Amino acid sequence: MIDKMDLSIKASHIRNVLGEDASSPIDIFALSQTIDSLTLVFYPLGKNISGACFHGDVSSIIAINSDMSLGRQRFSMAHELYHLYFDKDKLSTICPSKISAGNENERKADSFASYLLAPPAALCEAIQKRKEHTGKPLSLSDIIRLEQHFGISHQAMLVRLKEEKEISAGEADSMQSGIISMAARLGFDVSLYRPSPDHKKMQVLGHYICQADTLLQADIISIGKYEELLLDAFRDDIVFGGEEGGGVLD
């Protein structure tokens, strides 16, 4: 049986480990890049895999399916952090694309991800504010506002609200279409609902890139090998430069 209280406590602990407070929306990717010895890989992984976590003796890798929406990628990142911190006895974990559809450990990771991105107290407060504002039960526009606030995918928010008894399964089923157009009409950036743009579909961030630079600076590898390592990591932006490669920042 899944202990939701334990998972909520774990999520709160990881927020603290990553230097965040107990309730604010978080930039999960930026925070994950501060984790020592962790490499992030963004890559199109097909329709059946949301992400993966690989534990190593020296470093670890988390892979995220960049063909999924940004909201789903954020949820997948939070999900994989559960495996990184609490499944250290497993060398690798491949995670399914559908939320709450895997084995018990995958469902634990899903609940952890939901609590990490939208802490229970913060979500409860946000829900009550929406209800007080409208004087009605949660509508689709309310739910879009909630998922935009916490940066969580539409499906993940629907699953969470069903668990919190805020909406029924039937209501969730009726809220599956027209999401992007409604979000746009509400004034939101709709990138939360779209996959990564082509220039970010394949990229590597974190430990691998830093280690390549460390080896170069220590004269352990040549500039040619360094560039080869970067190109293998889809970081031609570092090798060849570009509009974002230099200049004065405002």
Image: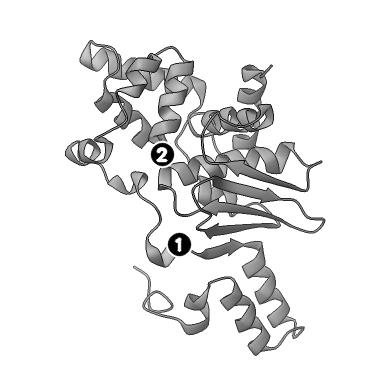
Residue under circle 1? 201
Please give left or right for residue 180 compared with residue 4 in the image: left
Residue 131, position as x, y percentages in the image: 29, 14
Q: Residue at image x 57%, y 27%? A: 111
Relative to 67, say whether 14 is above or below: above
Please give left or right for residue 38 compared with residue 157 in the image: right
Question: Which of the two residues, 14 or 42, is positioned nearer the viewer here?
Answer: 42
Relative to 133, say whether 143 is above or below: below
Residue 200, position as x, y percentages in the image: 44, 63
Relative to 190, say whether 225 is above or below: below
Secondary structure at badge 1 equals: loop
Q: Type of residue at label 2?
A: Gly
Residue under circle 2? 151
| Mark whose residue sits in front, 2 or 1 | 1
Question: Which of the two residues, 98 or 183, is positioned nearer the viewer here?
Answer: 98
Secondary structure at badge 2 equals: loop
Relative to 183, say whether 227 is above or below: below
Image coloring type: one colour
